[in-house]
Image: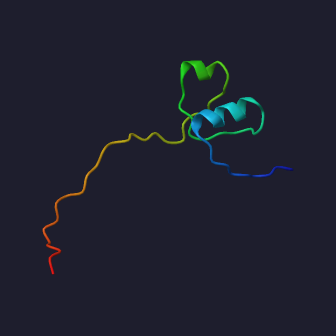
Amino acid sequence: MGCRLEICHFSERLMLKELEAGHFDIALGASKTEKRLETFLYSKPYRVATNKPIKIQPSPYSSSS
């Protein structure tokens, strides 16, 4: 195929700037907005996740020595 995979970590803002400049072809995890749809093509989502806050349950065990 003549392709090369290189994984780079960027902030979302820098990632979109670099993508628009043509420095790479694909980006993962960018939020879809109406403004971004004017510039970028989005695939169908392969998963949908909802972030929810969680907390640790109180432990029935004591850690005293």
As drawn, is 60 to the left or to the right of 29? left
Which residue is found at the position 63% from the left and 48% from the top? Answer: 9
Which residue is found at the position 39% from the left and 39% from the top? Answer: 50
Which residue is found at the position 14% from the left and 73% from the top? Answer: 62
Q: Is residue 32 above or below residue 47?
A: above
Q: Residue furthest front?
A: 65
Q: Is residue 36 above or below residue 15?
A: above
Which residue is found at the position 73% from the left and 52% from the top? Answer: 6
> Quadrant of the rendered structure where residue 26 is?
top right
As drawn, is 24 to the left or to the right of 64? right
- In front here: 44 or 41? 41
- In front here: 61 or 65? 65
- In front here: 59 or 2? 59
Q: Where is residue 25 drawn, in percent x and y?
A: 74, 38
> Quadrant of the rendered structure where residue 11 is?
top right
> Quadrant of the rendered structure where residue 17 is?
top right
